[in-house]
Amino acid sequence: MLFSDLVFTTTCPQHRFLDEMEHSVPWDWFDTQLKEAIRFKTGGRPPYPRLFLFRMHLLQVWFGLSDAQTEFQCHDRLSFRKFLGVNQEGRIPDATTLENFRHELEQTGLGQKLISRMDQWFQEQGLILKEGNLVDATFLRANSRPTPDPEMQSDLDADHGYKGFGYSATTNVDAKSKLIRNVVVDNNRAHDVIHLPAVLIGDEKELYADSGYIGSEKTLEARGIKPHICKRRVRGKAGEATPDLSDEDKDYNKRVAQTRSRVEHPFACWKQTYKAGRVWYRGLERVAQQVYSLTVGYNLQRLGYLLRTAS
């Protein structure tokens, strides 16, 4: 062992979160998925291993870093080098290499495929018991500001909605584990209920949602899903005040909200921990890939928690 390697192993600080990810994530499984989907060109300098770039991309997601910031932090922070398995003399990919890898995930569609394959893996591990599902949408602010002339906008895919200018991400979350099972990304103009059929997986038994999904009860029941959708006040006649909910409806909403509110946990993690309240990129395809990466990163973080609390 070189002296620099000895210094690295003895002085590298413990990072509880990264150490937990190192031991809880099925890295061999991810390596297989990456090798099957991403084919590097032959010739020239040997490329970095796919799993190495995937680990670096996860650091970018977990800590809310840009490509350039990720490159710098991987050079600077010993805990990042330890997670990547690189000693003080090892090479770190530059920001362009990381960007190209992210584009590979986008072009191959692996980002979205990983979510469904991880869902199957979670079921095999007994982490998803299908006791109920939670559906909700969150607003993601665009990376650019709207302009009076739509043709002059730098992000032509973002759109206006009642929450602002940007995108919408609709998630299907397991009620027990809080793992995200599916996600649909679109501009912010469409109503939340429009994306409900696309976000359903097909094995749901019960579904909890807020009042924005009123009107979808028959669709859910036709699929054998028992709906639990919050009730809202019905507007009164012209010139009359909107009547309040009955005590029975208020009690029903309270019971539904106790379970439905768990769907807010992934959104809070995305926006507060991963710093993704405003999307990092422009264009629907790139924003969708960011959301897929946020979903994978969140599910892996959640996996570490579930394994830790089960032991």
Image (tube, rainbow, N blue to C red):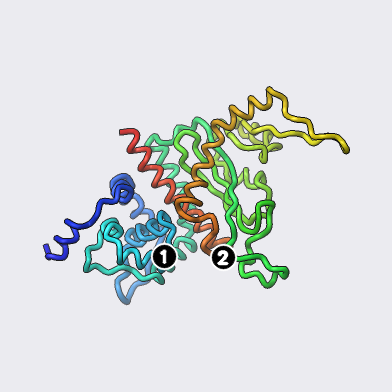
Front residue of 10/34: it is 10
Q: Is residue 16 left or right of residue 61?
A: left
Relative depth, front residue between 311 and 6: 6
Residue 87 in the image, given as x and y percentages of width and height: 22, 63
Q: Secondary structure at mark 1?
A: helix
Task: Say the numbered circle drawn on residue 282.
Answer: 2
Dot label at residue 101: 1
Residue 26 at least partly seen? no
The residue sitting at 12% across, 65% down in the picture is 2
Quadrant of image for the N terminus: bottom left
- Could you classify mark 1 by the number of other residues whose Cα lies within 10 Å: few (under 14), some (14-19), or many (20 or more)? some
Q: Which x, y percent locates residue 150? A: 70, 68
Dot 2 falls on a residue whose secondary structure is loop
Alpha carbons under labels 2 and 1: distance apart: 17 Å
Task: Identify which amino acid the numbered label 2 is placed on.
Answer: Arg
Does residue 100 appear left or right of residue 251 in this picture?
left
**Residue 6 x %, y %:** 14, 60
Q: Earlier in the sequence, mark 2 or mark 1?
A: 1
Q: Residue at x 56, y 65 (%)?
A: 282
Could you classify mark 2 by the number of other residues whose Cα lies within 10 Å: few (under 14), some (14-19), or many (20 or more)? some
* Amino acid type at mark 1: Phe
Question: Which callout, 2 or 1, points to the residue nearer the camera?
Answer: 2
Q: Is residue 154 above or below residue 194?
A: below
Tell me which residue sits at (66%, 27%) in the image: 250
Q: Is residue 304 above or below residue 271?
A: above
